[in-house]
Image: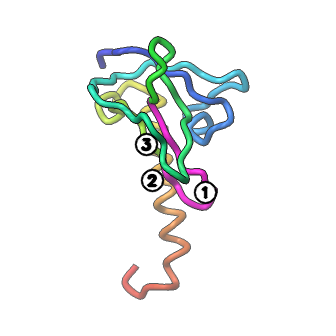
């Protein structure tokens, strides 16, 4: 995994819990390869990670506690084999999908 730069993760974020940030926050290496980035954050979203070198927004998450919304501006799929934070992001997605499936199970016969 070629590392492009690091990102600083907000210590109070859901992402911090996923990637096991400390109370002081966390800086993790990422393999970002983008040429576009978020500038204005929409309603219901908050910035939870930035590049310390240029301040570019690198991750957003939803503000509603009952929905799993996480967007990262790097490629965890490229480093999932050898990077624990990348694996943790995918595991969090799977866990959230399983929890949602459990809630919907009684509502739909085919679920």
Q: Quadrant of the C terminus?
A: bottom left
In this rendering, is residue 101 above or below 88?
below
Which residue in the protein does label 1 denote?
A: 64
Residue positioned 45% across, 15% down in the render = 54
In front of the other: 100 or 36 = 36
Kindly indicate the quadrant of the structure image that contains residue 37.
top left
**Residue closest to the far front:** 40
Q: Residue at x 68, y 35 (%)?
A: 12
Q: Which residues are magenta?
A: 58-69
Identify the residue shown where x is 47% and y is 20%.
51
Q: Is residue 38 magenta?
A: no
Residue 80 visible in this rendered orientation of the protein: no
Placement of 31 over or under 45, stated as above or below: above
User: Going from the N terminus, do you reach mark 1 or mark 2 first?
Assistant: 1
Q: Position of residue 44 (x, y in %)?
A: 55, 53
Magenta highlight on residue 62: yes
Which one is in front, 14 or 102?
A: 14
Label 1 crowd (10 A; few <14 / some 14-19 / many >=20): few
Q: Position of residue 56 (x, y in %)?
A: 44, 24
Q: How would you rate the neighbour count of disc 2 (Cα within 10 Å): few for under 14, some for 14-19, many for 20 or more? A: few
Label 2: which residue? 94
Q: CA distance from mark 1 to mark 2?
A: 18 Å
Mark 1 or 2, which is nearer the eye?
A: 1
Q: Residue 46: tell me if it is visible.
A: yes
Residue 9 lies, in percent from the top left, at 57, 27
């Amino acid at each position: 995994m070629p590392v492009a730069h690091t990102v600083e993760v907000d210590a109070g974020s859901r992402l911090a819990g996923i990637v096991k940030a400390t109370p002081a926050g966390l800086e993790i290496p990422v393999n970002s390869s983008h040429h576009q980035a978020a500038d204005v954050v929409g309603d219901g979203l908050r910035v939870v990670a930035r590049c310390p070198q240029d301040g570019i927004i690198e991750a957003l998450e939803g503000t509603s506690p009952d929905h799993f919304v996480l967007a990262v501006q790097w490629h965890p799929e490229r480093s999932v084999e050898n990077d624990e934070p990348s694996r943790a992001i995918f595991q969090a997605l799977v866990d959230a999908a399983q929890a949602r499936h459990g809630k919907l199970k009684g509502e739909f016969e085919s679920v």
